[in-house]
Image (cartoon, grey):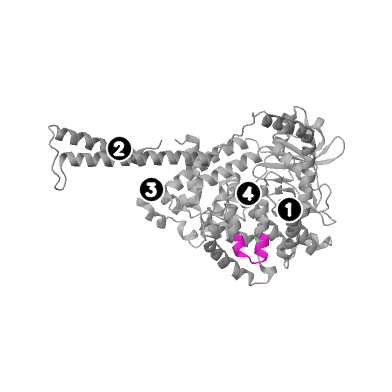
Amino acid sequence: MIAPGQLLRLVHINWVLVRNGLDEVILATHLFRPVRFLRYLAPWHRFTRNTPRAVRIRKSLEDLGPIYVKFGQILSTRQDLLPDDIAAELAKLQDRVAPFPGEQARMIVEHAFQQPISVIFRSFDEQPLASASVAQVHAATLNSGEDVVVKVLRPGIENVIRRDVSLLRYIAGLAEKYWSEGRRLRPREVVAEFEKTLYDELDLLREAANASQLRRNFADSDLLCVPDVYWPYCRRNVMVMERIYGIPVNDIAALKQAGIDFKALSERGVEIFFTQVFRHNFFHADMHPGNIFVAPNGRYMAVDFGIMGTLSPEDQRYLAENFLAFFQRDYHRVAELHVESEWVPHGTRVDEFESAIRSVCEPIFERPLNEISFGQLLLRLFQTARRFNMEVQPQLVLLQKTLLNIEGLGRQLYPDLDLWQTAKPFLERWMSEQVGTRAFVAHMRRSLPRWSERLPEIPELMHRTLQQAANGKLRLQWESRQLEEMRKEMRRSSQRTLSAILGSAFLISASLVYGLDGYTPLMLGGAPVLSWVFGGLSVFFFVYALTSDD
């Protein structure tokens, strides 16, 4: 049941959809199907009919406000589910959100710390540096003199998110019920994923922890600068970080003026991505140009750590092997890896999957390497695997989104970027560290403290075991689910066989008593009664043989 407030919001959403020429979405529902012809009479229809549907969807989300813009941004990462034109257009969505008053931000900070702003900071600029859908950022100076930025959640944003997300769930339910593509695109699952991401971004302590981890990972590296977190000044709705001064990565003119080496900058971006994914297993999953800056010395600087991604060791290994198999055009190995990792169902025929992958990849590899999009290849592979019932892997979707961002940014900085040539040596080096002598030595080194802790216990355990064996008290207990199932199945089979034999015997007895195919009935006074008894017993044992599970 929809609440009155949500009903008003739903009316507003429908109005925005109609105004942007998406009235077919509304009229496609069961309720409005009889009057769907009215859309051609609407005055705005002639102004929007020539506008591509993807553009109309993007404009609608922008008109609906920050939560729907954020929804569109996250939806754009699900290119495994969306048509290509809609996914590409939604990727253009940016957080162009009007800031809330700086005085409100000051009050939120004072309430969080239970102190006047003048006690907390030496200075606090009420004019925001940036404003997004969930929070905005203000410049400030600590009493100790450090320049910082203060990230403040929007007032009342949790209530807005709760209202709009519940409404999105309601709309997703309608889409699954009435839209022909609804069940295939699984809108309820998409909304659930969006809800989780949004609520994660509402906890600024979580974002601060992400930033601290990423900073530690690159503490000894010149590749990436991550601002320091001032933990005494962090709360769930307020976060204080070191202020960085850099050039926005998409400001090409300013980068040229600073004398930045674009080839080196683009290659370092690729190295940062693969270092995060394969070495650290903790990657920044929202690396759009608005979150990346460049220092005067060419070092990358990152901000906004609300969305981070991780991979399991198995996913890391399979991804690296997949990439290397692609470099070598070993499509059979790519197909095998997808089946082994259970990204596609276990019964999938490897030869059929290999053929489908080859049809996607061969045309791409006929082009010069610097014209091949690594991200687009990964996307096409996911789309191909979907035909083989590949289950959506959320961690791989985040990875795909990040790879597309990094590659697009690299090509913007240096159009001749050969991502393949940049990535291959890194992956080969990483794989050599995972297998062979080096991997064995590293594993032994990691396990040595645990072994040294348990080593003194081994002689006592051996003595106790041998003593039990000498005294005849050593017993081995072996439990196997498969053996137990086999034992039960054999018992069921024997019971069914015996029941079938008994049923057959009683059926023959009934036939002899009653007479069958020329047999003379036995001259017994109770012959009819006996025939019914034997017949009933035969039916009982046959039914038991067919239905018995124990």
Work out which residue is located at the far top of the displayed protein and give it. 114
Q: Nearer the viewer, mark 3 or mark 2?
A: 2
Q: Is residue 373 visible?
A: no
- Residue stretch in magenta: 323-334
Q: Name the residue under label 3.
A: 30
Q: Which residue is denoted by mark 1 in the rendering?
A: 434
Q: Which of marks 4 and 1 is nearer the N terminus?
A: 4
Residue density around tag 2, few if under 14, some if 14–19, many if 20 or more, within 10 Å: many
Give the number of the mark in front: 1 or 3.
1
Where disc 2 sits, the SS reads helix
Amino acid beneath label 4: Gln
Q: Which residue is disc 4 drawn over?
A: 395
For marks 4 and 2, the one nearer the N-term is 4
Q: In the rendered image, is residue 427 in sight?
A: yes
Q: To which residue does mark 2 refer?
A: 541
SS category of the residue bearing label 1: helix
Residue placed at 65% from the left, 63% from the top? 326
Task: Quote the CA–CA distance across marks 4 and 2.
Answer: 55 Å
Residue drawn at the location 42% of the way across and 46% of the way down: 177
Q: In this view, does 288 lie above or below 161?
A: below
Q: Distance between the residues labelled 3 and 2?
A: 54 Å
Query: Which quarter shows the C terminus?
Result: top left
Marked residue nearer the N-terminal end (2 or 1): 1
Is disc 2 in contact with disc 1, using a CB cutoff of under 8 Å?
no
Q: Which of marks 4 and 3 is in front?
A: 4
